[in-house]
Structures are given as C-alpha cells and as structure tokens.
Amino acid sequence: MSIILPSRTSSLSRLNRSLSGKQFDNARFFILVDENTYNNCLAHLVSHVERLQEAEFLEVPVGEECKDMAIAQQLWDTLLESGADRQTVLVNLGGGCVSDLGGFVAAGYKRGIRYINIPTTLIGMIDAAIGGKTAVNVGNSKNQVGFFHQPTITCIEPSFLNTLPDEEMFNGTFEMLKTFMIGDPDRYRELCNMILGGNLDIQPDMIAACADIKNAVVKKDPNDNNIRHILNLGHTFGHAIESFSHQPNQNPLGHGLAVGAGLICALYLSVEKLGLPQDCLDQYRAVAKKFMPIPHYSLQDTETLLSFMRNDKKATIDEDRNTIINCVLLQQIGAPVIDLPISENEIRQALLRMD
Ligand code: GLY
C-alpha cells in the first residue's frame, strides 16, 4: 500500500503520475461517491487526474446508511453488469463511510480487486482511509461484517477539507488529538496549545504527521492482533457514548466528538490506574470543552452505557462467562498500554466523573 501525504507538490498531481504508471495499464476505474462528494469533490478530482476522466461513477447515500449489505450487493451487481474484471480499480471519494463500504465491495468482488482511497473528511485523512479495515453494518451494530483489505493507494489532498462543515472538522480534530496522544507528545502539546489559544485551523503538516503515525502502526500489525489496539484509545467508551447519544431525546454526537468524550474517561482511568499526571487530564478536559459541552451522566445512564460496552467487538468473555471490558490507557502522553481489563465499577466511576 502506498500513501500520498500532503507536501509542497499537490497530492492529486502525484496521484496522476502514479495512475499513469505501468501497474495501472489495463485498469478500468470506477469512482464511488455520495451526494456530497459528487457535488463538491468529483469535478476537482477528475480535472486533476487524467486517468480518472474516463472513469464511470457510482453513487451511494450519504453517511452510515450506505454501509449496508443491500447497497454492497447493488454495487456488485452494477460492476458485474458493466463487465468489470479483476483489473478494475474502485476509487473511493468520500469520508469514512464511503471508504469502509468501497473497501468492502472491492475486497469481495472477484475475491478482491484493487481500490484507492481519496478521503474528503479529516477523520478519513488521518484514520479511516488508512489501514485496510473495511466493513458494513448489521442492523444497528456498526462494522460487524468486513475484511482487512489494504488500499493500493491512499491519496490525502487537504484542499477537499474546504468543503467541510465545522462539526466534521471537530470530529477529525479529536481523532488527531488521540493519535498524537499515543504517538507524538510534541505534536500533541502543540495541538493542545493551538486549540486552547483559540486556533482551530488544522494545517497540512499536522495531517501528514498524523496519517504517518497511523500508517506506521498499521504496518506493524495490519490485522489488528496487538499493537494496532493503541489506536482504540478512548474508543471503548467513545462507541458506547456515541450509541447512547443516538437514543431518542439525546443530543446525537458524531464519532469524533464521542471519542473525544471517551478520551476523558480513558485519561481519568489512566490517572487512577497507571499514574498519568492529573495535569494531563485537566489540560485535555479544557481542550475538549472548546469543541463541546462535556456530557453529564446519571447512575442510570451508566447502566445503559455499560450495556453498550458489553456488546463492544473488543469485549471478551472469561472462563466464568463474565464480560471483560478491555481498554487502552496511557502511562504518559506517548506511552499507551493495551488490553487492560477494567472492572464495571471503574467504568461507572469514569463515566460519572467526566465533567
Ligand atoms: N481506527 C482504528 C484502526 O484502524 O485500527
């Protein structure tokens, strides 16, 4: 897999050069878009990448709705009807939902064709489009069926972010804070200081540094058996907080904001269990408050949140059939510890002390 990171020369012109290379001689390109990327990004892409001017395009619904087996089936039908062969390359132009679905379709079609991710959201650029996790949802459960299938190229072009609403940028900024928390203490401090000083403008060099960390972790453990778990810092809590927020009468949170809230719980437990300095938690809480009111949960809410956490893909069952909830915590900024079993009482405490 190769990754085209933001640098002084435009990423799309480097993609253009790659697609003119021998390995794509016989390729036929299909571009997967949703309504947003069809309207805001497709013309820009094809005007800069010659080989894609002859591509056919496929459109799917915006958001999680597209990560559906029936939609994957329709895409396979369309590819078959169009005579797409094993030289076909699927180009996923969109956020994490488009790249998860497109990667899934590419992984299954004729037992695996190549695909290229061109992320258009910040979360896509620093996380979802890198690493080959592909999936569709089953009912309300996210990412339950999928494959590890690495993209041939991930091309990160920051100018696509100009089309993004603030909320989407905030979602991505929390994933960026998480990645620097596990992998680059200096960048983490720099980003915190920026945000605390009121500057929320994410620069291409930050995106490149963050994508690089994710890529390096994936290279060490592509199938997510051990070290890749560090990328889940804040996610065990974050997934539950996200599901909770989508219940009736709650304030729905995007994935990044929910992870941002989950990071408070992870840092709280890191202070309690691993001796992370309290300052780190206090500073992070102040950063998170710049983007959202910190959720406040009652004891009753924590029971619902715990029930979501017991269903987490990464929870395990011990020999007495008790659910073990495993978390990533931090000894220091830049020093994550994976797979720490956390008791239900510790989880309740962390959730009750978020704000
Ligand atoms: N988003 C976490 C991972 O790719 O492993």
Image (cartoon, grey):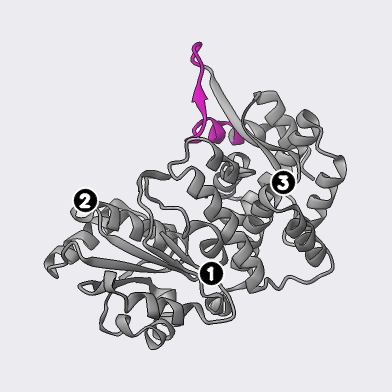
Q: Name the residue located 23 percent from the left edge and 72 percent from the top edge.
A: 27
Any part of residue 318 in sight: yes
What segment is highlighted magenta in the picture?
305-321
Mark found first going from the N terminus, 1 or 3: 1
Badges 3 and 2: C-beta atoms under 8 Å apart?
Answer: no
Any part of residue 141 in sight: no
Q: Amino acid at mark 1?
A: Leu
Badge 1 is on which residue?
5
Q: Amino acid at mark 2?
A: Arg
Say which mark, if any, is on residue 264. Answer: none
Badge 3 is on which residue?
334
316 falls in the magenta region = yes
Quadrant of the frame with the C terminus: top right
Q: Name the residue located 36 percent from the left edge and 60 percent from the top edge.
A: 66
Q: Secondary structure at mark 2?
A: helix
Where is 68 relative to 296, above or below? below
Please identify the quarter of the rendering in which residue 298 is found: top right
Give the farthest residue toward the right: 279
Quadrant of the frame with the N terminus: bottom left
Question: Horizontal placement of 171 versus 136: left or right?
Answer: right
Say which mark, if any, is on residue 111. Answer: 2
The picture places residue 61, in percent across and down from the top left corner, at: 37, 66
Q: Within 8 Å: ligand 1 and the Cβ of disc 2?
A: no
The picture places residue 147, in percent across and down from the top left corner, at: 34, 46
Where is 106 relative to 59, above or below? above
Mark found first going from the N terminus, 1 or 2: 1
Q: Amino acid at mark 3?
A: Gly
Q: Nearer the viewer, residue 28 or 97?
A: 28
